Amino acid sequence: MQFHIFAKNKFLGMKTSSFITLSILFFLASCKPSQKELDKLLDKAIEEIRTSNNKNGIEDLNKILEYDKNNYQAYYYRANAKFNMKKGKEAMIDYNEAIALKPDYADAFFNRALCKQFLNDKSGMCRDLAKANALGKENIRDMLNDCQ
C-alpha cells in the first residue's frame, strides 16, 4: 500500500515540476527584447562591422536573429561581416536569406555580386549586378561593362 502512495506522490511531483518548467519557459519567452532594443543592437552591430570588429558584430546579429528570424538587415550585415572576414561561402548563405526576405534589396544584390566575384562566379556576379542596377543601385555601370 505504501508503494502505491509513493507512486501517486511521484506522479504529482512530475506534474509540479512540469508546471514549474512551463512557468520558467513562459517567463523567458516574455523577456524578449523590444523592437527598440533590437534596433539599438542592430545599430551597435553595424558600427562594430564598420570599425572592423566583425566578430562582435556577428555575435550581436546572431542575438537579433534569435528573436527575429525575418530581420533581413541582420542577415545582410552578418553577410557583410563574414565577407569582410573572407568567409565567402558563409556570406553567400546570409546574402541569399536577406534577398529571400527582401527581394528588392539592391545593396544585397550588389554585395552578393562582389561575394560571387570573390568566389570566382563571374556569371553569377553579372546577374546580380544587373539585378542591383535594375533595382536602382547607382555607380555600377563600370562593373557592368566587365560583364559584356
Image (tube, helix red, strand yellow):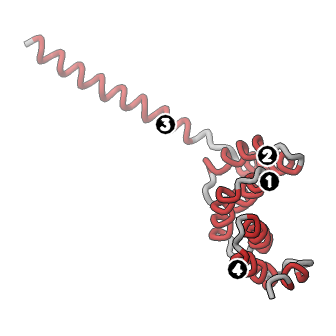
Element type where label 1 sits in the image = helix
Give whichever of discs 3 and 4 has the lower sequence position: 3
Front-most of residues 76 and 20: 76
Q: Which residue is mark 1?
A: 84
Q: Position of residue 134 (x, y in %)?
A: 79, 85
Q: Nearer the viewer, mark 3 or mark 1?
A: 1
What is the number of the mark on residue 106? none
Q: Position of residue 137 (x, y in %)?
A: 85, 77
Q: Is residue 10 left or right of residue 25?
A: left
Determine whether label 2 and label 1 are within 8 Å by CB: yes
Q: Which residue is mark 3?
A: 25
33 lies above or below 92: above
**Which residue is at a point 73% across and 60% down the rendered structure image?**
76
Q: Is residue 13 left or right of residue 97?
A: left
What is the number of the mark on residue 123? 4
Tell me which amino acid carries mark 2. Asn
Give whichever of discs 3 and 2 has the lower sequence position: 3
